[in-house]
Image: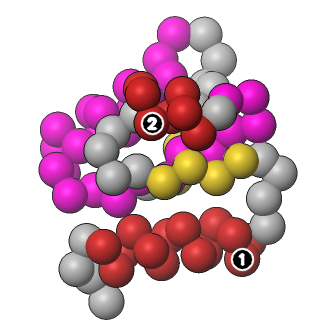
């Protein structure tokens, strides 16, 4: 799952990721945001998630996704 931390009013990306993990506990999660710090993501996100700060390149995002997929045992 790639989810922005800030989704507007109400539900946050943190909420979406937590819900996703209730359905699929091993779900890889990458949070993206241009207005949130990595420390805030670590404190409010889900375990073993990655954080990519906006703006980012496709290569940066791909690197984090590859790291997560490898960490979760998928090929």
The quarter of the image holding the N terminus is bottom left
Q: Is residue 23 magenta?
A: yes
Marks 1, 2: nearer the viewer: 2
Residue at (50% x, 23% y) in the render: 12
Q: Which residues are magenta?
A: 10-36
Q: What x and y, as percent, mark residue 62?
A: 60, 75
Q: Quadrant of residue 36?
A: top right
The quarter of the image holding the C terminus is bottom left
Q: What x and y, as percent, mark residue 74?
A: 27, 82
Q: What x and y, as percent, mark residue 60?
A: 69, 70
Q: Is residue 66 magenta?
A: no
Q: Earlier in the sequence, mark 1 or mark 2?
A: 2
For mark 2, give the secondary structure.
Answer: helix
Left or right: residue 71 compared with residue 36: left
Q: What x and y, as percent, mark residue 13?
A: 49, 31
Rendered image: mark on residue 42: 2
Residue at (64% x, 52% y) in the render: 52
Can the viewer see residue 49? yes
Q: Which residue is mark 1?
A: 59
Can the viewer see residue 4? no
Rendered image: mark on residue 21: none
Residue at the front extreme? 39
Q: Residues within 10 Å of mark 2 (few under 14, many from 20)?
A: some
Left or right: residue 9 compared with residue 69: right
For mark 1, give the secondary structure.
Answer: helix
User: Do labels 1 and 2 touch, CB within 8 Å?
Assistant: no
Residue at the right extreme? 55
Above or below residue 74? Residue 45 is above
Real-space Cα separation, disc 1 to disc 2, in angstroms: 22 Å
Residue at (36% x, 75% y) in the render: 69
């Amino acid at each position: 799952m790639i989810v922005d931390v800030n989704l507007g009013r109400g539900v946050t990306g943190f909420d979406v990721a937590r819900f996703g993990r209730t359905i699929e506990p091993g779900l890889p999660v990458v949070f993206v945001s241009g207005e949130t710090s990595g420390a805030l993501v670590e404190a409010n996100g889900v375990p073993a998630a990655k954080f990519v700060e906006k703006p980012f390149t496709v290569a940066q995002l791909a690197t984090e996704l590859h790291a997560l997929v490898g960490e979760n045992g998928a090929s």
